[in-house]
Amino acid sequence: MWQNYSKNSDEIYENALKRAKKALPEHSADDNRFKIPELNTQIQGKRTFFRNFKEVLAMLNRPLEHFLKFLSNELGTAGNIQGSQAIFAGKHSKAQLNRLLKRYVNDFINCPECNKPDTKFVIQGRVSMMKCEACGASSSIRSVG
Ligand SMILES: [Zn+2]
């Protein structure tokens, strides 16, 4: 009797463990789903070339002007697009651009409510809002510059 009971609860425990293990990879896959390609930047003369700007932008799924304005403001310099790259005046290290990209993701991609990247910009009336498709939250967008 006791033996049976014990075996049973072991099984319950093991099933719970299996479920937990099964849930784990899904969760981490979810977290890693938003992968930003490595920045390809190069300083040439007095200018900084962000070679894969459009590739990164495609991952971010944000308006080009918005991302460019953000970078220009944060770098305190002018930036323009040439083909698939962005060019900024002045010398800016890759580490610096990486930090800005992380800040951009944090401020303009990740939902402030649930922290998932499933957000998009929507126009509500005359203002742009960030709408989260994961939890449904709408949040205001911090103005750039
Ligand atoms: Zn959310």
Image (cartoon, grey):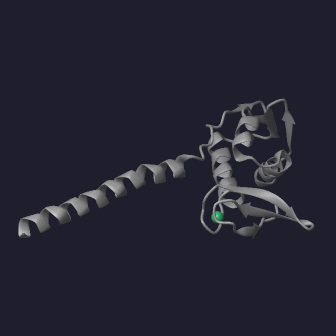
Q: Residue at x 75, y 37 (%)?
A: 53
Picture coordinates of residue 37, whole percent (x, y)? 62, 38
In the rendered view, tell whether residue 118 sits above or below residue 127: above
Quadrant of the rendered image containing residue 43: top right
Q: Residue at x 50, y 47 (%)?
A: 29
Q: Nearer the viewer, residue 110 or 24?
A: 24
Q: Residue at x 70, y 54 (%)?
A: 104
On the rendered structure, is 114 left or right of 27? right
Which quadrant, please, contains the N terminus?
bottom left
Which quadrant, please, contains the C terminus?
bottom right
Q: Residue at x 70, y 68 (%)?
A: 137
Count of marks placed on residues: 0
Question: Is residue 22 in sight in this rendering?
Answer: yes
Q: Nearer the viewer, residue 107 or 90?
A: 107
Quadrant of the rendered image containing residue 114: bottom right
Question: Is residue 145 in sight in this rendering?
Answer: no
Picture coordinates of residue 3, whole percent (x, y)? 7, 65
- Image quarter for ligand 1 equals bottom right
Q: Nearer the viewer, residue 60 or 26?
A: 26
In the rendered view, tell whether residue 8 sits above or below residue 18: below
On the rendered structure, is 26 left or right of 34? left
Quadrant of the rendered image containing residue 83: top right
On the rendered structure, is 117 left or right of 130? left
On the rendered structure, is 31 left or right of 98? left
Picture coordinates of residue 105, whole percent (x, y)? 67, 54
